[in-house]
Amino acid sequence: MSTIFAWYSLFTVAMSVALVALWIVNGPSILAAGAQDGAQDDSESLATAEAGSGADYGATATRSGANSAPTAVPLQDRSFMEQIKTFEFVFVMAFAGIHVTRGNLFLGLLESFFDSPQFGADAATVSYFVNLTSALVPLGCLCAPIVDNIIERFGFATTSYAIAVMGATYSLLMLSSSINLQIVTAVIFLVYRANLFAFPPAFAGRIFGPRTVGRVSGLMWTLMSPVQFILSPALHMTLTTFEGDFRPLQLMQLVAIVPVVILTYLLTRWSTEKSVGPPTPKIPRKGYVELPLVDPPLAPNGLGVRGTTAAAESRRMSIAI
């Protein structure tokens, strides 16, 4: 087991160095791409307003015209101090503080949990399940793409709900007295842990932008870190007040998910950031319909009508109706 953790530590250091190197190499292009995407979002929002559809849920329009009201400036265009005073920053900090603390309680109290009267297992069985669970959890890195896929398809709010469901599921399974069922718990937990650590940086990068994502993420992790000191008092309370029964602690962790769910709901109601909700489908401009043109017959010289090639004539175009 010590060899596994030694290699895991080396792997973590290598990934950290690679991250810094990749940011130095690709940082300028990422910033340029973010600025280009912001300009594209603005143009799409203006087109939607001209079509008379108004601002869609989660839109980030920043322009105002004669027939439209001014909208909020996107967080990516605000200063760092303005960004950390927003509800979005409070949300991601609370998300990280609650979910990461739950994950650390699971890992930090793992041996005491399996050795509790809830299972009544002997030392060999406890050692087996502790080692098995410890070996499964690092495999969660393979599940990280799940959160990216959910974010791309459904937005950050739905992703937050999905992570909360995973957290509640494994906490409910930990209430069982079946020690074999805890293998299922470990599998769900490794997916949960991978996604809870992938969510905050993805949220910070997409919502606050690449210009300040480092400072926003650093401040977020710093502010929520003191909560992690709850691990020792939680173990002491479980062993003394609850006489080694971990089920009251699991119920407390279930209740702790409720604030995240409430904050996620408020995020969908208050935030104007486009990525919070599901992607908005592109709406064609009013009065126009997009039709494909059929390839015209070729002339003897191999050209289509008006001397242009058939490929050029088959381009899609908007025809007024």
Image (cartoon, grey):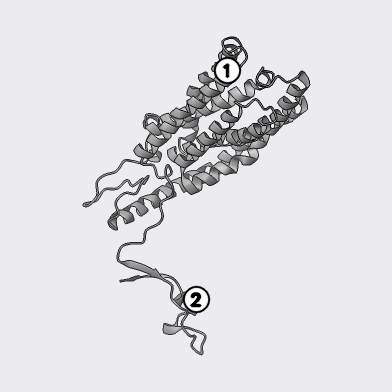
Few, some or many residues within 10 Å of mark 1 (<14, 14–19, 20+) = some
Q: Nearer the viewer, residue 228 or 301?
A: 228
Q: Is residue 108 above or below residue 239?
A: below
| Location of the C terminus (image quadrant) | bottom left
Amino acid type of the residue tagged 1 in the rendering? Leu
The residue wearing badge 2 is 311
Residue beneath the point at 47% across and 41% down:
158
Q: Is residue 118 above or below residue 310?
A: above
Residue 269, position in %: x, y?
35, 38
Residue 275, position in %: x, y?
43, 44
Residue 104, position in %: x, y?
59, 24
Amino acid type of the residue tagged 2 in the rendering? Ala
- Residue 159 in sight: yes
Q: Is residue 238 above or below residue 305?
A: above
The image quadrant that residue 133 belongs to is top right
Q: Nearer the viewer, residue 108 or 52?
A: 108
| Label 2 to label 1: alpha-carbon separation | 67 Å
The residue wearing badge 1 is 231
Question: Left or right: where does residue 310 sit relative to residue 6?
Answer: left
Circle 2: element type: helix
In primary-sequence order, the first of circles 2 and 1 is 1
The image quadrant that residue 170 belongs to is top right
